[in-house]
Amino acid sequence: MFGAIAMLCAVLALAGCSSSENTVTRNIRVIAQAEVNGKIVEGSAVMGTRWTSDGKKHGRMYIKTNAEAVALELPNLGTVYIINAYMTDNRRTNGNYWAFQILDSFGMKANGKLGDFPKLRALEGRYPVRPIGGNAKLLPLMVAFRDEAKRETLFEVKPADFPRLFGSNVRFKGMWFEFTDDAPTDSGFRDRLPVMWKANPSYRETFPLRDASGKLIPGVDKGFPQKVAPGDFYRRGY
């Protein structure tokens, strides 16, 4: 039996599938701050990202995430959620923001590559969240609800818009991420925002999934807020 197991392990190693050298898992704590009436309020959550390579020097990378939104509570004014997604120029939303933030912050592009793994393992410290690629529109997407029971009331919150949306005495202060050994946060978003996991009738009426002729609207043709997915608020990928 032992010989059979050893042979199987050798075969898997030759296939480049079992070695820990082909996998990196890093956790970051994302911290967001606002100022309300002269006082700092803060929200944070730990995100986990796992990069797995097929073992080839220029092969394919697979990214999996354990992440949830950062809830930035503004006393008596509501909650701003920083979600694991970003907004493109054509009002489409793409997910898995934090994995790309880490890579871009340290000069690693696309999904990463096997040669980046030593650097990824060695990264430590705390860093400001900067726009991916230097494009100010590629910060993590911040959203809020006018009514958390109705998904169609979801709206975008940009850093400069805090005074206009929440009052002249409210300012967004900044956002940081720091590498940590803490486990990814699990704050129970399914219980807090059930509307993200089950569309209510008013959402379906406001954003129907079929056009006037009854034809199904492809996912790529749905912009914000339809494209904001439950997995942008809470995801367990590994």
Image (cartoon, rainbow, N blue to C red):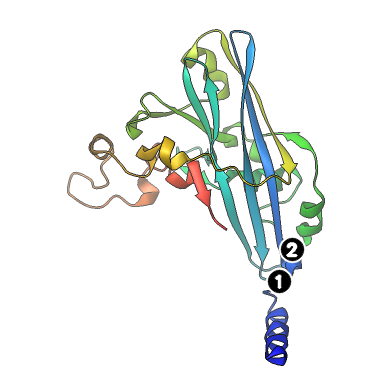
Mark 2 closeness class: few <14, some 14–19, many ≥20 residues within 10 Å: many
Residue 224 appears in view: no
Relative placement, left or right, of 105 versus 83 is: right
Residue 150 position within the rendered picture, expressed as x and y whole percent measured from the top left: 32, 31
Q: To which residue does mark 2 refer?
A: 114
In x, y percent, where is residue 213? 17, 48
Using the numbered discs, state the Cα–Cα distance from disc 1 to disc 2 in whole angstroms. 7 Å
Pointer 1 residue: 55
Q: Seen in the image, is 162 located left or right of residue 222? A: right
Q: Mark 2: which secondary structure?
A: helix
Q: Is residue 171 above or below residue 198?
A: above
Look at 80% across and 47% down and name the residue there: 123
Residue closer to the observer: 98 or 106 = 98
Percent of width and height locating residue 40 = 64, 16
Residue nearer the viewer, 178 or 155: 178
Indicate the quadrant containing the N terminus: top left, top right, bottom left or bottom right. Answer: bottom right
Q: If you read the primary sequence from the N terminus, does the residue marked by circle 1 or circle 2 appear first?
A: 1
User: Viewed as shown, does residue 174 lie left or right of 196?
Assistant: right
Q: Element under label 1?
A: loop
| Residue shown at 33% from the left, 31% from the top | 149
Circles 1, 2 touching at the beta carbon (< 8 Å): yes
Where is the C terminus found, in terms of image quarters? bottom right
Residue type at numbered disc 1: Gly
Q: Which residue is pictured at 64% across the width and 52% down the height?
A: 49
Residue at image coords 35%, 38%: 195
Q: Quadrant of residue 193?
A: top left
